[in-house]
Image (cartoon, grey):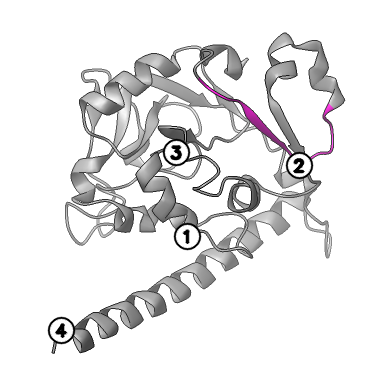
Amino acid sequence: MCFLQFSGNFTILLFHYDGRTTEWDEFEWSKKAIHVSVRRQTKWWYAKRFLHPDIVATYDYIFIWDEDLGVEHFNAEEYIKLVRKHGLEISQPGLEPNKGLTWQMTKRRGDREVHKDTEEKPGWCNHPHVPPCAAFVEIMAPVFSREAWRCVWHMIQNDLVHGWGLDFALRKCVEPAHEKIGVVDSQWIVHQSVPSLGNQGESLDGKAPWKGVRERCKKEWSIFQTRFSRAEKAYLKEINSTSH
């Protein structure tokens, strides 16, 4: 179980989107965890509503993880030591290269403790210090410092519950982003690709439920990009007007 990899120095908060909470009572650690259940929601919907920066201000780091991660090679205490050693404000464990990998940046490297940049497919990065070649982690298993989370929380949109596009914008929350965002290789996880959330989507026009969820994710990403671009332009305009 994932939670056995976290010591008593951590508080476990479980978000139940399937309405099943009592089944966890057989585990001793579950009795000490905090359980929040709202059917057919996502972790970013929960995070926006239950992890306000003021509420979690007593914690040094916030782990916001998916439910389908293998943690046999992960120890949370050792992970935090490495994050502090390498000055990472936003991070994630490296991913097993042969399982559920989307981006080269998140692939575990076996010859180092941490990496902060990578080479991607041609055309993906217009600069070596921007996502997804650097200053980038996925929304699957991010870890935020208290200070970074205060910024990221405000970036999360109430109605864009899947969080797509957020990973490309995280760099706006720390400076210099290509130094303070990275992947921890020596503590790694396995993405097991269990389609649990996708199966709760609506089956429309003969399409599988997960296809409906994926379509919504893509639509949300487009909306997020539009909003983010608009907000950034407004911010720069305000800065320029006050500097004259």
Residue 123, relative to residue 222: is it above or below? above
Quick one: SS at disc 3?
loop
Extent of the magenta region: 10-21
* Residue 9 position in % (x across, y down): 49, 17
Mark 1 vs mark 4: in front: 4
Mark 2 vs mark 4: in front: 4
Quick one: SS at disc 4?
loop
Mark 3 vs mark 4: in front: 4
Towards the viewer: 29 or 120: 29
Which numbered circle lies on residue 243? 4
> Mark 2 to mark 4: distance in Å?
47 Å
Q: Amino acid at mark 4?
A: Ser
Residue at the disc numbered 3: 142
* Residue 177 position in % (x across, y down): 23, 49
Q: Amino acid at mark 2?
A: Tyr
Residue at the disc numbered 2: 17
> Mark 3 to mark 2: distance in Å?
19 Å
Q: Residues within 10 Å of mark 2 (few under 14, many from 20)?
A: some
Towards the viewer: 234 or 167: 234
Q: Residue at x 55, y 63 (%)?
A: 157
Q: Quadrant of the C terminus?
A: bottom left
Quick one: SS at disc 2?
loop
Q: Earlier in the sequence, mark 1 or mark 4?
A: 1
Numbered label tally: 4
Residue 165 seen in render: no
> Mark 1 to mark 4: distance in Å?
25 Å
Q: Are marks 2 and 1 in contact (CB under 8 Å)?
A: no
Q: Earlier in the sequence, mark 3 or mark 2?
A: 2
> Mark 1 to mark 3: distance in Å?
16 Å
Towards the viewer: 114 or 159: 159
